[in-house]
Image (cartoon, rainbow, N blue to C red):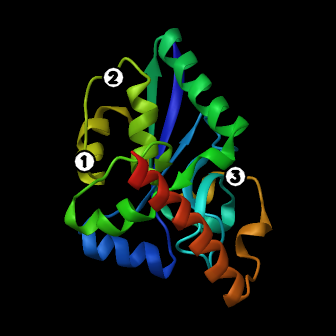
Amino acid sequence: MKEIYIVLSATNGHIGKIIRKVTNTSYNHLSFSFHPDLDILLSFARYYYSTPFYGGFIHECIERYDNADIRLYKISLDNQSYENIQHFIINIESHPQKYYYHTINALLTPLHKRIDIKNAYTCLSFIDAILQQSNLTFSFNDVQELMNHLQPYLIYEGSLDSFKLSSDLSYIKFIPLHQIIKLSIRQNYKLLESFIKR
């Protein structure tokens, strides 16, 4: 048997607080790790603090969390499920330009609606895609449903103080407004193009 780790977090930024208020949940972000010390966390999210509509697959850094409250789940999987997830992640890491942050679904979150577009993910649908590679059989549409299913796997709840994440200061670097607009339009044009072609 092999273990994977799912992290739910209540990030301290303005967008995180808005998401929690609108969705009436305690957590707004989800991440995945193969490592019990959470040295490497993976997710789909914005690339930089100042670019809410420009994102994709990321290796997360401690600056994203700012000592946020988290819930950590440890899930034991059979070897085949674990290998399936490894291959899924390797494929994304090998072709990151083919994957998008699903801005449309992020905006639809308060309505509990979802539109499937190939290779486009929010943090929630990324975790859903990972778990679909496993021998687990449950499905979920929002964070609260996921928490209900994962309750038996909970191993930690509290501040991120005791965990060390690798530092990557690129997340908090300043991005000029004109570049934010340009990056956001370019990426979301590709997302809409994929949506139209599906």
Asked which secondary structure carries label 1, the reply is: loop
The residue where tag 1 is placed is: 141
Asked which secondary structure carries label 2, the reply is: loop
Q: Amino acid at mark 3?
A: Lys
Give the Cα separation between the discs numbered 1 and 3.
30 Å
Q: Which mark is residue 164?
A: 3
Coordinates of residue 82 in the picture (x, y in percent): 53, 19
Q: Earlier in the sequence, mark 3 or mark 2?
A: 2
Question: What's the residue at 60%, 76% (across, down)?
Answer: 51
Asked which secondary structure carries label 3, the reply is: loop
Eyeballing the image, is 175 above or below 30?
below
Indicate the quadrant where residue 15 lies.
bottom left
Query: In front of the other: label 1 or label 2?
Result: 1
Q: Nearer the viewer, residue 26 or 158?
A: 26
Q: Which mark is residue 157?
A: none
Q: Earlier in the sequence, mark 1 or mark 2?
A: 2
Indicate the quadrant where residue 61 lies.
bottom right
Indicate the quadrant where residue 29 lies.
bottom left
Q: Can residue 16 be seen in the rendering of this structure?
A: yes
- Is there CB contact under 8 Å for labels 3 and 2? no
Question: What's the residue at 29%, 65% (across, down)?
Answer: 108
Q: Amino acid at mark 2?
A: Leu
Coordinates of residue 126 in the picture (x, y in percent): 46, 44
- Is there CB contact under 8 Å for labels 1 and 3? no
The residue where tag 2 is placed is: 136
Q: Amino acid at mark 1?
A: Asn
Q: Earlier in the sequence, mark 1 or mark 3?
A: 1
Give the Cα separation between the discs numbered 1 and 2.
15 Å
Q: Nearer the viewer, residue 81 or 54?
A: 54
Q: Quadrant of the C terminus?
A: top left
